[in-house]
Amino acid sequence: MAKQWSAPVLLTLSMLGAPAVLAATPESLVAAYAAQAGVPVESIDVAVGEALFRQGGGSEKQCSSCHTQDPRAAGRTKVGKRIEPMAPAANPQRFTDEKKVEKWFGRNCKDVLARECTPLEKASLIAWLAGLDREGK
Amino acid sequence: MNMAIRGILVVSLVTAATAISFSWPGALASGGDKEKRAWPAVRDEAWVSECGACHVPYPPRLLPAASWDRVMDGLADHFGENAELAPETSERIRSYLKAHASGARGIGWRYDDDDKRANGAGNAAPLRITETRWFRHEHDEISARVWAREAVGSPANCGACHRGADKGEFNEHRIKIPK
């Protein structure tokens, strides 16, 4: 998308003081986390992401405790508030804001795994979620 | 004065005092109907988006400033969950909450005092709105069975019954208790 923007548009945005970083995409985030991990993007394994989502954490708290086992479905916080689906196919807003992504990885990895997630785990998880289509696999 | 008239006077005075002290705290501040429709009138954006991501952004007036300090100091373990924020966001929300807390200037409602009367020892900085005497009084007709309903889940889930809660609307007319 960014590539299609004309120079005048970009110039206007920069004059308006728009953020220097253009909106992220799931793909750009996977690439950035892969780079942080020091591995090629092509080596990112969606199965690692799926396993993290489905089996990460102990018995007490898992991703699915709030997000359910289906990332295309809405989840529910501990106090009952709706959580929009995690899969971009069901919710295009997901993984478009790097700060938000980092904030929630920060919180939720500590809750579920009692540690930070590694860049490799983050890349794999986003890659898996972004690869899910609306209906099935 | 005739005893019967005195009795009526006492009863009506007590009723009026009770009605005022237990009515929605917004009624005590200026702003009137407009404020009660969407309350609090001042809504900080960071408070709405950050606190409101997981639960209804709880109106700051429902706890004293000392409570909000405790809440904001403990975000790494926020009722069992990590709710850490970037320092600048955290400080912004802390200032907003404290500026509009109960007991803040111009806001004549102190749950801490209430709880001191209710519990003897008292708790000057309760962490939960549900611990306040005001909350218990307002919800005393709600049975444990209702709180336990799937669609309610917990008394922290204001929006289950107060349909405008996420917009700051707690008007009695908008209450609909789910089956």
Image: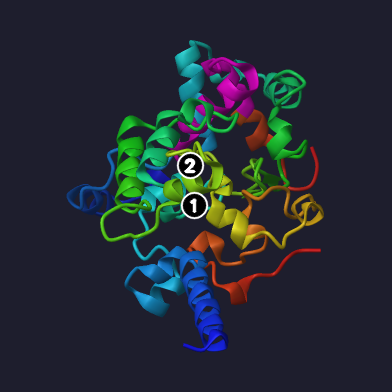
Residue at point 63% right, 52% down?
B157
Are marks 2 and 1 in one subunit? no
Q: Total label count?
A: 2
Cα distance between the residues tagged 2 and 1: 27 Å
Callout 2 secondary element: loop
Q: In the image, which is nearer the foreground, mark 2 or mark 1?
A: 1
Residue B84 position (above or below residue B36): above
Graded by Cα atoms within 10 Å as few (under 14), some (14 to 19) or many (20 or more), the crowding at tag 2 reads: some
The residue that label 1 is drawn on is B58
Q: How is the image coloured?
A: rainbow
| Closer to the camera in the image, A30 or B169 | B169
Q: Which mark is residue A62?
A: none
Describe residue B31's horizontal placement relative to residue B121 as left or right. Answer: left
Q: Is residue B128 left or right of residue A13?
A: right
Say few, some or many: other residues with alpha carbon within 10 Å of mark 1 (under 14 / 14 to 19 / 20 or more).
Answer: many
Front residue (pair A55, B110) = B110
Q: Residue at x 22, y 47 (%)?
A: A14
Residue A12: name its quadrant: bottom left
Q: Which mark is residue A96?
A: 2
Choose between B85 and B16: the one closer to the eye: B16
- Is B41 located above or below residue B73 in the figure? below
Q: Is residue A49 magenta?
A: no
- Residue B40, position in %: x, y? 40, 62
From this viewpoint, is residue B142 visible? yes
Task: Pinpoint the chain carrying mark 2.
Answer: A
What's under tag 1, amino acid-wise?
Tyr
What quarter of the picture does the C terminus of chain B occupy? bottom right
Amino acid at dot 2: Thr
**Image: magenta residue range:** A97-125
- The overriding secondary structure of the stretch rendered in magenta is helix
- Residue B106 occupies quadrant: bottom left
